[in-house]
Amino acid sequence: MTFAGREQGLMLPPGNPLDLSGIEDLPRVRFVNRQRGAGTRLLLDYLLAQQGIAPEAVEGYAREEYTHLAVAVAVQTGVADCGLGVRSAPARWAWTFCPLAGNATTL
């Protein structure tokens, strides 16, 4: 039985107007990041390394927010084209979500 889960992915505007599908697309968009030390930031760094993408190649890598909701707001207001976070943050605006990683605790 699944007790709890956490799915992380790209938070995108409705309809995914830039047709983003994964980490490999980040060098061509404006991104908003989580702060250094956050689990989401560690996941991003891991995924970028897997794709051979240098953080400097991602516009907005240095732009940091401290919550998933703040990342979602940055995308909603047009400050960024996308950000990495949990599915629940953009769900309140019925946005597009591109899952990249997740886990669940089972009982």
Image (cartoon, rainbow, N blue to C red):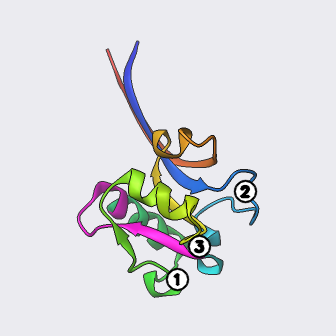
Query: In this figure, which residue is indicated by the disc labeled 3?
Result: 26
Residue 36 in which image quadrant: bottom left
91 horizontally vs 42: left or right: right
- Cβ atoms under marks 1 and 2 closer than 8 Å: no
Q: Is residue 1 magenta?
A: no
CA distance for labels 1 and 3: 8 Å
Distance from Cα at disc 3 to Cα at disc 2: 14 Å
Determine which residue is flagged by label 2: 16
Number of the front mark, 3 or 2: 2
**N-term-proximal mark, 1 vs 3:** 3
Q: Mark 1 points at which residue?
A: 59
Could you tell me which residue is drawn at 36 percent across and 57 percent down? 40
Q: Earlier in the sequence, mark 3 or mark 2?
A: 2
Q: Which amino acid does label 2 sit on?
A: Asn
The magenta span reads 30-41
Mark linked to residue 104: none
* Residue at 46% across, 44% down: 89
